[in-house]
Amino acid sequence: MAANLNRRDSILKRGTIVTAIDNKQMKQITDTLFKFISSDGHNTTHKFQSLSNRGVFGSLYTSVYGMAKRYSIDYLDSSGKIHSTTIPVYDPSKDTFNRTAIRRFIRPTKKERKEMNLRNMRSLRIDGNNQTAFLDVNSFGRGYQLKKFFKQSFRSIRKHHIEYLVVDVRGNGGGSVTNSTLLSKYLVNEKFKVCDSLYAISRKSHYKSYIEKYFLNRLFMIAFTRKKKDGHFHFGYFERHRFKPKRKNHFNGKGYILIGGNSFSATTLFANSVIKQDNVTVVGEETGGGSYGNTAWLIPDVKLPETKLEFRLPLFRLVMDKDQPKTGHGIFPEVQVLPTSDAIRRNADYKLDKVMELIKDDKIEKLKTKSP
C-alpha cells in the first residue's frame, strides 16, 4: 500500500503488502477497478499509478463494492507471513484530526501563485559537484514559458560544463508538440521526424453544432491537410519534415530520461525521438501513452444536446513509427525500474536512485579508462 488515510494505524503502514480485502484477492480487486480507469490500449502502468494516488483506491473501491462498517484485511508481515486484521471505516474526525496541526493559511498573491505554478510545471537543479543537472518537465502545455525556460536551462547546463542530464517526464501528460519537439532538439544528434503519418478521416461533421470551435478547426483542416489515395486527409508537413538538432547550447553529455505511467501524448513523442540515441538512456516504467501512436492532436470539446455530457473528440490519428508493432502498449524503458515494498516504505525515489547508480557506474568506467 502506498498510503493510509488513518495515520494512527500502527499495522497498515506505507509499504505494507495487502493480499486481500474481505476475502477478495488484490488481483481480483485491481482487475475490477481497472475497468473504471481509462488507458491507452493494454497499458496498465497508468492504472496502477492512478490507484496509488492518495485517496483514489479507497474512493473507487467503495464506489464499486460499497461502503462497509468494517473491513477484513489480509497482509504480509516483514518475514512474509500472512496475517489478518479488521479495521473500521475511516473517520476523519477520529483517525487523523489534530487541532495542533491547524495553521493560519496565508493566501499567496496572484504573482506568487503564477511563480509557484511555473516551478511546479518545470524546474532546473544543477549539482556542480557531481556534474549533474536535473530537468523536471511536468507539462508540455502552452502558457508555461517553456521556450524561454529550455533556452535558459541548456545555456546554464553548458556554462556549468555539465556531463550528466536527468530529464524527468514521469508526470508529464503531454501538451504542445512544438514544446516537446523543442526539448528533443537540445538532445538529439541527428534530424528526426515527429511522426510517419498524421491524418483525419473527414474534414466535416454532421454534428458541428455540438463541437466547440468547429468553424476554426474545419478552416485549419482545409488549409493544412490534403486528401491522399487512402481517402484520408493528411497533415503532410509533419509527415515529411525532419527537425534539426539545436546547435547552440546542445547537450552532448550523457542523458537519462525518466518515464512512467503518467507519461502521455507529446511526452511519448519526446521519448520516442531520443530512445535510440547512444548517449541517452530511458529509465523507469512503460509510458501511459501508446508507442505506436495516439489521437492527441486537435481535440475540441463536445457537448451532447440532451444529457449535456461533455467529452473531447480527437480529429486526427498520429502514427509515430509505422514499423512499430501494434502491441497496444506504451514505450518501454531501456532500464526498467519497478516499485518495491521497501522503496515505498522508505518513500524513496527508486527510479531516480537507479539513475544515480548508472551515473556512478559510468564515472567509474571513465576512471578505469583513464588509468594506465
Image (cartoon, rainbow, N blue to C red):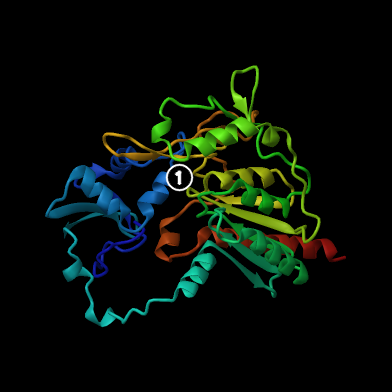
Q: Closest to the observer: 50 or 192? A: 192
- Asked which secondary structure carries label 1, the reply is helix
Residue 48 vertical placement versus 121 (above, below): above
Tell me which corner region of the image, top left, top right, bottom left or bottom right, holds residue 70: bottom left
Q: Is residue 292 visible?
A: no
**Residue at image x 25%, y 48%?**
61
Q: Residue 28, position in %: x, y?
A: 29, 39
Q: Closest to the observer: 298 or 68? A: 298
Q: Residue furthest left?
A: 69
Q: Is residue 342 visible?
A: yes
Give the side of residue 263 with respect to residue 44, left or right.
right
Residue named by callout 1:
45
Query: Which image quarter holds the N terminus?
Result: bottom left
Numbered label tally: 1
Query: Which image quarter holds the C terminus?
Result: bottom right
Residue 302 vertical placement versus 279 (above, below): above
Assess disc 1: are there few (<14), some (14-19) or many (≥20) residues with their C-alpha within 10 Å of its C-alpha: many
Q: Closest to the observer: 128 or 107? A: 107
**Residue at image x 60%, y 61%?**
145
Give the side of residue 5 with respect to residue 211, left or right.
left
